[in-house]
Amino acid sequence: MIKRMTKATSMLVAAAAVVSLIPATGASAATKTLETKEGTIEQAIAFDGGNYIFDGYKSSDDETGVYFNNGDKDKLVEDIDNADSVEAYGTKYAKVVDGNDEYLVDLSTGKIVEDETSEDIKDTLTSKLRSTLNKTDRYGQIASTSDLDLTEITEKQFGQTWYEYAATTSGGAVLNGYVNDAGKYIDTDYVANVSVLKDNKLVKIDNFGEVDSTSKIKVDLASAKTIAEDADYIYRVATVNITFDGVAQPQKTYLQKISKAQGETEDEAYLPKSVASYEITAAFDSEDADDAATSLADLSQYDFRVINGVVYATNNDGSKVTVKTFKLKKDKVAVDGGTTAKLDAYLVEQDVNEDQDVMGTNAVSIDVDGNTWALNKGTIYKFDGSDFVAVYSVDRAFDTLEVYNADSLLAWEDGEDAYATVAKATTTPVDQTPVVNKGWVNTASGWTFYTSAGAQVKGQWVNDGGVWYYIKADGVMATGWVKDGANWYFLNASGAMKTGWVKDGANWYFLNASGAMA
């Protein structure tokens, strides 16, 4: 559909006059003014190096559609008619939903990833994880993929994709953990590492579900909510049930910092390399801990990020944005109402509490590094850890903000025909997360398979959980048609060998029980 624009030209003519009226004092004096450009943007995702994808149009000659901009010019993304939603996914993709169809667009090139969606990735990972967990005594046999539920823990954010999983074993137990898109998992239902106050002493309890032989304290995981992740850790708020000699005590809440790296095993299942737990409580003589307990009573009001080990909680009510920071500390404190003796307690303590007026709900954006940005009356602010600092000046009517980092962002007025960008080439750091080479491992080239001894399989068939897969000579799992010797075999999108009738294109083929085409 072709649209004409009527407002942007007059805004551009007036821009110089508006800027000239701004006093060169205060925050405005330190900001860089971004040029107002013609174009209607309905939704957008900014990316590294000034690249971005948007739904809308720039000139009266353009169709309304999804466009990719490489920092210089727009290119219509073919095959996508309309965008119901556009959001960040993985390290470099935009997930675009058009009705019942989903597309992954590579934001480094602007090209659609062929024959793969986020659901395809999740389904394949679910199958691989089930196969891996079934090899452990802790999980026994997970009957089907329907007994393994995966939930992406940081949706609409750039970074390596991690999922929270809940696995129902053949015995009916539900075990939880995390797994990344490369298939590396950690079980998080065993290690507790929490400190429990009893008789004015703090007792460290190592594991969930086990009675401490000396103190007779037992802790059980009642519930957990994942709130954030950084390069090395996942952060969750865990509520635990506590008993003293079998007598129930009030529940306690801890913010747990869980290592993504695999550590020791429990019944052959990998546990995190480390778990650190910090109590959210007002039970000690610490005003900062008291403030944290009050602020974190309702987690649903915040969007959490972690920067340099500090937890940032952003609340956006549409009229102002508030950022609170929380430090995870070992502190010497006394028990409220107890003795004056100081105890070494691991606590969550509130540090900074700052707010900034904004133009609306869409005038707040959190960048790839976890920094909160805000737009209000022509000024774009960045929260620097202690205060909101003015960085850019834009048209005062702009009410929507999308930020990748300080060198790549967009601002525009919803429903109107003007926008502004800042683009400067940057380098995206390479993910240094180590991969444990056992079983299935996802790489940039595709899925690979390693034996229990760590040797990579190449050029042969692999039977994993009763399902046959073919690993090509380059070590990458095959899909589609594969010729092995004189026989042809067909492998579905997850790599599993098919038998019986298979339809490929317009043709039907019959595959014997061995998988070989008849």
Image: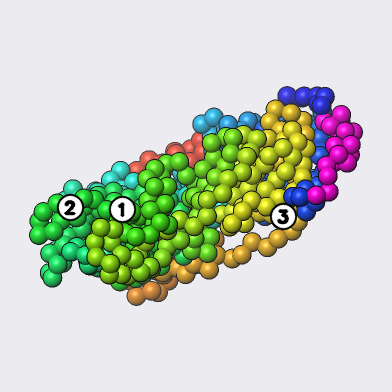
Residue 451 spot, x, y in % from top left: 36, 70
Say left or right for 425 vs 303.
Answer: right
Tell which circle, 3 or 2, labels the residue nearer the N-terminal end. Answer: 2
Label 3 crowd bin: few (<14), some (14–19), many (20+), radius 10 Å? some
User: Closest to the observer: 61 or 370?
Assistant: 370
Q: Spatial distance from mark 1 to mark 2, Cα to Cα?
A: 13 Å
Q: Which label sits on residue 323?
A: none
Q: Residue at x 34, y 46 (%)?
A: 149
- Residue type at tag 2: Gln
Q: Secondary structure at mark 1?
A: strand
Tell me: residue 177, above or below residue 262.
above
Q: Residue at x 12, y 64 (%)?
A: 216
Label 3 or label 2, whichever lies nearer to me, is: 2
Q: Spatial distance from mark 3 to mark 1, Cα to Cα?
A: 39 Å
Tell me the residue that label 1 is attached to.
253
Q: Are marks 3 and 2 in contact (CB under 8 Å)?
A: no
User: Closest to the observer: 167 or 313?
Assistant: 313
Q: Is residue 344 magenta?
A: no
- Residue 350 visible in image: yes
Say left or right for 499 vs 210.
Answer: right
Tell me the residue that label 3 is attached to.
407
Looking at the image, how many numbered discs can be counted on the residues? Answer: 3
In the image, which residues are magenta? Answer: 8-25
Residue 425 figure quarter: bottom right
- Residue type at tag 3: Asp
